[in-house]
Image (cartoon, helix red, strand yellow):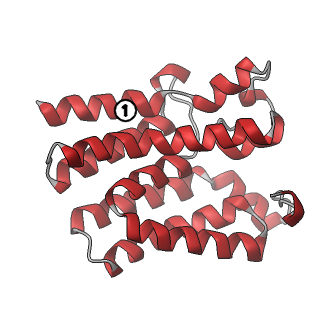
Amino acid sequence: MQAFLLVLFAYLLGSVPTGYILGSLAGVDVRKAGSGNVGATNVARVVGKRHGIFTLVADIAKGFVPVVIALNLGLTSTATALVGVAAFLGHLYPVFLRFRGGKGVATALGVLLGVAPWATLLLAVVFALAAFASRTVSLSAMIAAAVAPVALWVFSYPPVLIGMSVFLAFLIIWRHRANIKRLLAGTEPKFAASSR
């Protein structure tokens, strides 16, 4: 029962549409501006960097907080993985936005930071290197997501957590389908090195 309630809490917390709320407070419906995504990158582009940073931190927390609670309660790795997946799916398919949410990168980062901090540190380095080389947030995020299962395996985390990271990576890449098309067409937006 404890695990079930925490999974439910994680989903509802993940469903809180941080970017949409901050955009609305600033008078912008982020779903109708820029890429139409409610994540931090689009919020930063259409509302402002400060709102983008707030969105990023809050979306990371949506994944981090539930799994840390699960760990502190002594739940099994399987139960903790389910809690992390619930938070992640809440962000992707939020009940408060008719199940139309973001791409899950920041929330997945929060989940992994909670359950696998050392592997996540490695993934942060991978993301930074990819971003430096490509100047493209979406490509860097997909590369880091794809490397995540390998990073968890290198640090000998339980198989169920590695499996969770495979699931997160698959959905992150799937949610970036439009970005992949733009990358192949050479039209994906890049960020200026001097402005990030």
From the image, which quarter does the C terminus lie in? Answer: bottom right
Q: Residues within 10 Å of mark 1 (few under 14, many from 20)?
A: many
Nearer to me, 40 or 159:
40
Location of residue 22 with respect to 123 vertically, above or below? above
Horizontal and vertical percent position of residue 114:
36, 54
Q: Residue at label 1?
A: 11
Badge 1 amino acid: Tyr
The quarter holding residue 57 reads top right
Instruction: Please say whether residue 114 is visible from this viewpoint.
Output: yes
| Residue furthest bottom in the image | 154
Is 56 above or below relative to 184?
above
Instruction: Kindly give the residue lying farthest to the left in the view shown.
Output: 1
Q: How many marks?
A: 1
Q: Along the horizontal axis of the image, is 20 left or right of 46?
A: left
Q: Is 73 placed left or right of 98 in the picture?
A: left
Quadrant where the N terminus is found in the figure: top left
Q: Is residue 35 visible?
A: no
Image spot of residue 54 (x, y percent): 64, 37
Q: x, y (%) of residue 24?
A: 71, 19
Nearer the observer, 187 or 165 = 165
Residue drawn at the location 21% of the way across and 28% of the way down: 5
Give the image quarter of residue 158.
Answer: bottom left
Question: Would residue 188 be found to the left or right of residue 117 on screen?
Answer: right
Q: Which residue is drawn at 28% across and 62% down?
A: 161
SS class, disc 1:
helix
Q: Residue at x 61, y 69 (%)?
A: 127
